Amino acid sequence: MSDRDDFPAPRHGLVVTHFLTVRDVKVSREFYADIFGGQVVLEENPAAVRIANSWIIMNPGGGPTPDKPDIVLTPPQPGDPVSAFLNIRVADIARFYADARAKGAHFLTEPKDRKAELRCYLRDPDGYLIEIGQATGMLHGVFADRPATSA
């Protein structure tokens, strides 16, 4: 570790990080460092990549431990429902999209205009969903249409 300020260990208060259970630490670590311009802070056990003002922490899955009894950590399987995802905000989505695609990122669609924002999604090597968004209309009080209600 090059500098304590690079690691999510606050001197006061707290920081928020995101932990991902991954199949291959090296592959995931390189994906987050490359696609998002992250800085690898720890190589493994756990891997930690600083991205802008946050950190992604990665480790392989495993069974229960004394501090999390009855909990098994596994990466998502294809077809699993999504209950949470990374939401990354960018200043220029067209530039990010082009740069990330050039680095090998696979997006579900190109950026779409949702009135409040431009956004698109990609998946990481383990299948975690990542939203990439650029605020547009919401900066001026324009928001996306509400979903239609079920009958």
Image (cartoon, rainbow, N blue to C red):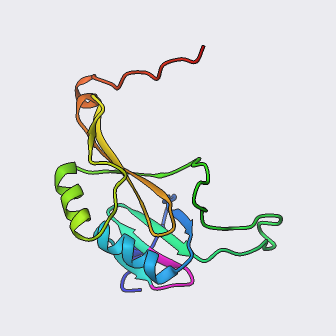
Residue 38 covered by magenta stretch: no
Residue 52 visible, this angle: yes
Q: Can you say whether 71 is above or below 82 in the image?
A: below
Q: Residue at x 54, y 17 (%)?
A: 149
Residue 47, percent from left and from top: 49, 79
The C terminus lies in which quarter of the figure? top right
Residue 85, x across and y down, in percent = 50, 51
Please state which of residues 120 and 109 is positioned toward the viewer in this rendering: 109
Q: Which residues are magenta?
A: 43-48
Q: Is residue 129 above or below residue 124?
A: above
Q: Main secondary structure of the magenta part?
A: loop
Residue at 35% in and 26% down: 144
Q: Is residue 64 above or below residue 116?
A: below
Residue 92 visible from this viewpoint: no
Give the mark count: 0
Q: Which residue appears at 30% of the width and 32% of the height?
A: 114
List the single residue furthest toward the top.
Answer: 151
Q: Residue at x 77, y 69 (%)?
A: 67
Residue sitting at the far front: 79
- The residue closer to the viewer here, 31 or 106, is 106
Q: Give percent across and percent down for residue 103.
A: 25, 71
Q: Is residue 45 left or right of residue 5?
A: right
Q: Give percent across and percent down for residue 70.
A: 83, 64
Q: Is residue 92 above or below residue 116?
A: below
Magenta-drawn stretch contains 45 = yes
Nearer to me, 78 or 49: 78
Question: Can you say which quadrant of the picture contains the N terminus?
Answer: bottom left
Q: Quadrant of residue 29?
A: bottom left
Q: Is residue 67 left or right of residue 150?
A: right
Query: In the image, is 33 to the left or to the right of 74?
Result: left
Residue 19: quarter of image: bottom right
